[in-house]
Amino acid sequence: MNTYDVIIVGGGMGGLAVGALLSKAGRQILLVEKNSRVGGKGMTFEKDGFKYEMWPIGYMPLKDNAFDILFKELGLEEELKPAWDYESEEQLVGFYYKGRSGQYELISDSRPKNTVDPSPLFNLWQLDDKERESALDFLTQMVLLTPEQVDELDDLSMEEYMSQFDIPEPLYDYMTMHSNISILALSDKASASEQVKVLQEMATKGAAGYFKGGYERVCKILAGYIETNGGKIVTGQRVEGLQIEGGRIKGIATSDEEFHAPVVISNAGIQPTVLKLVGEQHFASDYVDRIKKLEPGLTLLTTRYFLNKVVLDRPLYLTFSHDTVWDTQRYEKVRNGEEPDEVGLWIVVPSNYDTDMAPEGKQIVIASTLCAPDPQAQEVDMLWKKIDEMIEKLFPGVISAIEFKEYGGPAQVSKLARDQVLPNQGGEAIGLGQIVGQCGRHKPDAQSPISGLFYVGTDAGGEGVGMVQSVDSALNCFEFVEDYLA
């Protein structure tokens, strides 16, 4: 009774997606999740009538993304329910930028499909004719790069790529902001190939998506699909280790019992899987060294403001300036306790995507800034204070309408999702850092050196932003596993 075709460790978006695909293929699936429910970092919570994720979560592109491919493959297209249409004429994003005027100013037009027209941004940045020409030249060249040309950027950071062009400072700030927010990386480490792929899709297919009912609704649909097709999901049970015999996977052990399968897919992160669940002794030393050297992505330090009235009118806000975007030098200063004057913010208002996400006449504002992925990070209190300061400066109506607040940071991420197995890691927002040396041809394979052991999630085999990358990895992992079982 404890034998299956495939066992999946972890019920995040990647684990659920690959489980659903394998269930459709007729495989007997067991999915084991340590938390009391599935969803991982995409869990949706409820309190006093509010529904929300613990941190800002968005997907992109708005159309023809990995979610669309997955749900079409499962025959569940009608269940996906995006909260925002690419063709919408409503304003979606509020860009606040502090540039030459010395004051934060709001972009005048930010409809989803208007991402192909940079004029509103150029106006916000107060670019002169020559600067507009150089900025447009850079953006056009970037968007028109072929896939082969993009692949050639694997060994360049986004900062190195930008240095090849004469671009105005506001555009540099904008691109660096996207390194920080879109792929949660420092600009001098962010993989140019990874970020260019993201920006190309953003320019042609839109960005800043959200699903009605929140992300956990998507996870529940996938979990239900697994169970309807004969799979089993066990929650509240931690996997203590993976069983290896003769260089092949044999199954898993929990604190209560053992389960057996010729294939195990880990959605627990590549480092916790190799270094903790399996153990270094089962891998070649050079592979272990490579895994240990992999750098995590940054995390999002978050304040959730529960408001007694509606204050903000857009679903998403991004605030940034030349002084708030991060490279390694600025990151290290903050890590060493130096307080920045300002921080950039990524703000999501779930009820502006879906009115059912908050009680009528109320609102929740989820505001985040960058932070180290270290669950013991000492700068968190300082950065929470800076979030409050920035909210009061740019959105004073939020402060006066607060009913109560909640906080989240790397310690909460680590507790909810990934176990800490290396110093200064464990609380990363997405998983493996999308940085030079870890993306494109350098990304770890979905298939591990151990026969029958595979990885899914943002650590292997996928591309894109956050949850989309997890689903993309699941689509790829499914093909690997089916070939292996065949």
Image: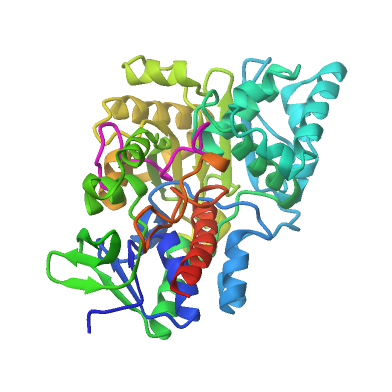
Q: Where is residue 441 in the image (x, y as percent from the top left)?
A: 56, 42
Answer whether residue 421 is magenta in the image.
Answer: yes
Nearer to me, 307 or 474: 474
Relative to 240, does residue 414 appear above or below in the rendering?
A: above
Answer whether residue 350 is magenta in the image.
Answer: no
Q: Is residue 236 visible?
A: no
Q: Where is residue 29 in the image (x, y as percent from the top left)?
A: 36, 76
Nearer to me, 249 or 405: 249
Q: Specify the segment rendered in magenta.
A: 419-439
Nearer to me, 341 or 142: 142
Looking at the image, residue 320 sits to the left or right of residue 13; the answer is: right
Relative to 270, does residue 424 appear above or below in the rendering?
A: above
Determine the residue positioned at 49% across, 71% down: 482
Relative to 19, does residue 215 appear above or below in the rendering?
A: above
Determine the residue positioned at 42% across, 26% down: 389
Q: Which residue sits furthest left?
A: 256
Q: Can residue 29 be seen in this view?
A: yes
Looking at the image, residue 240 sits to the left or right of residue 294; the answer is: left
